[in-house]
Amino acid sequence: MTAQQLPSWADPSVSPAALDPQGLSRRGLLRRAGLFGAASALGSAATSRTPALAAGDSGRPGGEDPRLAYLVGDHHIHSVYSHDAKYTFSQLAAKGAEYGLDWMVFTEHSNVGHAEHGAALEHREILRARAENPRQLIFQGLEWYIPAAEHCTVFTAPGPHEADLLTRFESAYDGKLLAYDKGGPADTDTARNEAHAVKALKWLDRQRRSGYVDDVLVLANHPMRLGIDSPHELRAWRDAAPDIMIGMEGAPGAQGAAIPGLRGATSVRGEYENKPSAQSWPGYPAEAYVTYGGFDWATATVGGLWDSLLAEGRLFSVTTNSDAHRIVHDTWKNGDWQPGQTFDDTGRLPDPVNTNTPQPGSDFWPGQFSRTHVGVPLPHYLSGAGGAPIGYRAVMAGMRAGRVWVDHGHLLDGLEVRLTRDGGRGRGVTLGGRLRVRKGERLTLNVTVTTASRPNPHGILPELTHVDVIRGAVRGPVTDRDTWKAPDTRVVRTQDVSGRTGTYTLRVPLTAGEESFYVRLRGSDGNRNGTGFLGASVDPHGPVPHPPGDGDPWADTWFYSNPVFVDVEGF
């Protein structure tokens, strides 16, 4: 593999004149954090770190987290190697670079053609792309049809066995290939199927622990689109391999599905247009099957399913992505098959053809609308000797550690969160971290926002109007594994930030009570909000569903952050 390089915005050897406005803004964030030039100055010393040090993991609860640079990415992208997509690998990689992505994961649908032909063909393209684009991290992955449930992103760190592991996993554990999917009327052995999903995650965990691959991660995709990912399944997956199964899409792709006049009067952002079926878990309310401000009900409901997982005191991350298949207003169509060819025979669709006429679509290009920001210690980003380059491992380690925030519509240029003890020294802990404190101790949540400095790809200069602080009690493992409520979680503060620009810091005072707790953040452009699903006392002005067919995503944008945990101890 060609030697890995820093992203251009982080590389002091790249002139500011060569950067676009987004790159200039991100370089400014590095300067303010004191990180610009750090990785370059360290040189080979940075590259000799172990994977653990490269991730910046101290292993000390309540210890200081490192200073971080946030790399922007998308973990759910489909190309001609998926039977229902359209674009070539090079088209998608170029668009991702155009919209500022530092890392991308290609997650093709499993099926016979992909398992037998497509995965190997795609791998050869990925190897070439890595060599030709050393500033961009390009992962190979798979969209796994989970036995008894829906879909997951599965992806690995680069290495000699990455494609082999994905192909072996697909053949042995994919619900679609095994006809173990969804546990519905066509296959009533739900218990067997759920057990097979757990077995699959444990198998992936063994491959990582044995060193067969350097790393592998799994995230549940669009969990509430069909309502077949039950709370007990999410908990079972997490518990089976907590270092592998790290979270879920907080917001699905297909965010352009409800642009007025595009797909019809019943369209919903995310293509969440399904109603409960015989396969759905019966405990979900009817309101769970649509998106709220473009976000999945499981994430958007304060005190809901995501919070019920966090209230157990265990990290479970949320992300967002494009799920790119067919881009809104695009003019390309699928190419024609040669006589006698099918996807099962080739593992690859014919190259698309430009018609110069808009074609049907619901998605945005990778990085165009949905962005997942992952914090990494930039001085440890460069390649090391042996194994996967550290940049790949650093992104995966950052995701595992929960150093993640997400936004739509390029709402923010930057977000930095630190929780500190009052009167203490040091940087404190950041997203995904844990701070150990005494009962009654006073804390400060420091939220540094860098507002959007340029128009987004739709030509709008986004404006953040409020930041919500959400706090929830940590009560430990639940007795009822199908619970989806966290009754002690609510919005505890809303800060009006209308009109504020540039970089500013909100300092939110907190006090540790008798119980451990967590805090997480959310905010929006203020265009569309209302009472949350569990009532005004829990969430007085949260995201709301849009009217069917009237869901312009650029006019209703939000950011969400992962939590910071506070462990209250009697020391």
Image: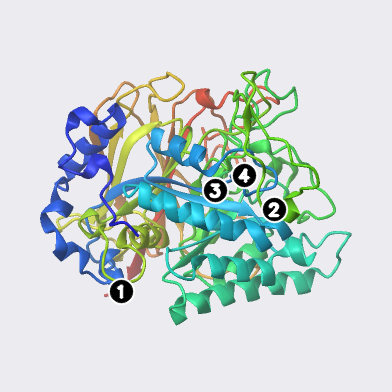
**Which element carries disc 2, helix, strand or loop?**
helix
Residue located beneath label 4 in the image = 80
User: Which residue is pictured at 81% across the width and 55% down the height?
Assistant: 279
Left or right, 13 with reference to 483: left
- The alpha-carbon separation of the residues under discs 4 and 1 comes to 57 Å
Left or right, 341 with reference to 516: right
Q: Which comes sooner in the sequence, label 2 or label 1?
A: 2
Residue 214 percent location from the top left of the image: 41, 71
Q: Answer yes or no: do the residues labelled 2 and 1 have beta carbons within 8 Å?
A: no
- The alpha-carbon separation of the residues under discs 1 and 3 comes to 43 Å
Residue located beneath label 2 in the image = 346
Amino acid bearing label 3: His
Residue 278 percent location from the top left of the image: 85, 53
Q: Is residue 181 above or below residue 303?
A: below
Q: Which comes sooner in the sequence, label 3 or label 2?
A: 3
Q: Answer yes or no: do the residues labelled 1 and 3 have beta carbons within 8 Å?
A: no
User: Which residue is pictured at 79% across the width and 68% down the height?
Assistant: 190
